[in-house]
Amino acid sequence: MATEQFDVTVIGAGPGGYVAAIRGAQLGLKVALVEREKRLGGTCGLRGCIPTKALLMSAHNYELAQHLADHGVQVSEVKLAFDAVQKRKDKIVNKNAAGVSYLMKKNKVTVFNGTGKLALPGKVLVTTADGQTQTIETKNIIIATGSVVRPIPGFETDGERVVNSDHILELKEVPKSLIVMGAGAVGVEFASVYSRFGTETTIVELMPHLLPFEDEEVSAELEKSFRKRGIKQQLGTRLEKMEKTDAGVVVTGKDAKGAEVRLEAEMFLVAVGRMPYLEGLGLEGSKIKVERGNVQVDEFCRTGEPGVYAIGDVIPTPWLAHLASKEGILVVEQIAGQKPQPINMRHVPSCTYCDPEVASVGLTEAAAKKEGYDVRVAKFPFSASGKARILGEEEGFIKIVSETKYDELLGVHIIGAHATELIAEAGVALQLESTAEELGRTIFAHPTISEAMMEAAEGIHGLTIHF
């Protein structure tokens, strides 16, 4: 087949790859995008961020509907139509994927459907599903192939009783009981979804806390909230063995004190372990270094091979869709001759869409102390917020971490309603190197949930009004 020539070829159409393709085209580059799946959007759009949040929204509304009488709204009967939940989720996913395809056409990005393989220097081979091969000639290459579920020895999934994060999105019925292995973002989000759908849910975590990399006070608050919702927690526990039974699955292990743990449920979700997807990419013999499964890059996402970059889940930066997008933009701006600044990894927000939501940006209190800062912290609880009372969502708080020398904000940690939206204003404050005083003097509208940010900032200097 005829050879095409491009300024940049992106392999992978997830939120890193397709965003890089669009920004490259906006900057006047001739861009090719290679994707092995028929739909564009990657793990985030097809099997991650978008479908899970659609399920979370349905679960939230189902729970809310059961308590509408508290708001003076009389509902005769509330039922869960799980098939309709799944149809809505699929509709959203398909609409998003179609939107990405539209953006490719609008920005004149040439899309190749097939598996990409590096043929260095300056070539990418694309093999279609029917075995045909096409060669793309390109000045630059961006590896954005994302990640896939990593098999856990002894806990092999079958898609029925033992499932992973891909399988559980496609269930036909709500399980009566579920054990979730792993209390990271994936684990606590699915625990939130299915517990609200009526599943008896138990979450098991090796570390001593849920969301073990968040601020400890946030983790403790989430644990309290989960207990209130009836989600059982087996923390500090290592699972060692899994056995399928006629009724479901039995898992056994030991807790932190060495005591035997035995749990039984209809379904078992393996919510730990993903790995970069580099299979068949042709990195062998190149100058691209791979360590512990990750492509090694510098602060500008450059690999050891001239003209080859890597972004997103294939590199050892936080595996977050919004970071992958910014990494993609960073790369194509370099290719286009601009001089972008490296990404400040401390300013990358982390969001978990469980109930209550958790979000953070910057240093935790413990990390700030470890780095030697003279730390000052303040919290404002949503229970003291008029808007939170109106919403009936009074759980959680905003915690601000600052330092005393310059009063600079070091980190913001939120658990509660709309935490994943509120964290954006904290990100802006850290980006602008704001002080706690500056944030506290900013006028926030009343009544809003966001006022809690102002009150927490004022609390750094003991000036909180409403608490």
Image: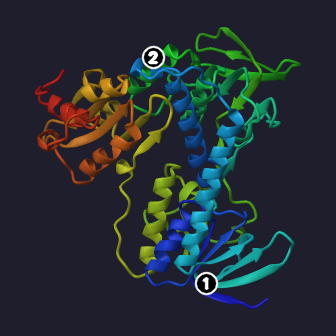
Q: Position of residue 249 (x, y in %)?
A: 80, 21
Q: Residues within 10 Å of mark 2 (few under 14, many from 20)?
A: some
Of residues 345 and 91, the one drawn nearer to the viewer in this rendering = 91
Q: Type of residue at label 2?
A: Lys
User: Is residue 374 visible in the rendered structure shown here?
Assistant: no
**Inter-mark Cα distance, 1 to 2:** 54 Å
Amino acid beneath label 1: Thr
Tell me: residue 395, above or below residue 315: above
Q: What residue is drawn where x is 53% and y is 49%? A: 319
Quarter where residue 291 is shown: bottom right
Labels 1 and 2 touching (C-beta < 8 A): no
**Relative to residue 398, is residue 89 depicted above or below?**
below
Q: Which residue is mark 2?
A: 224
The picture places residue 158, in percent across and down from the top left corner, at 83, 36
Kindly identify which numbered label has been placed on residue 138: 1
Mark 1, secondary structure of its residue: strand
Left/right placement of residue 133 relative to residue 351 reads: right
Of badges 1 and 2, nearer the viewer stands: 2
Which residue is farthest bottom?
A: 2
Q: Position of residue 425 (x, y in %)?
A: 29, 47
Residue 293 rendering spot, x and y as whole percentages: 65, 53
> Could you tell me which residue is drawn at 73 percent across and 20 percent down?
176
Earlier along the polypeptide chain: callout 1 or callout 2?
A: 1
Between 1 and 52, the one lying in front of the other is 52
Locate the N terminus and report the quarter of the image it occupies: bottom right
In which quadrant will I find the C terminus?
Answer: top left
Left or right: 95 in relation to 375: right
Answer with the quarter of the image where residue 458 lies: top left
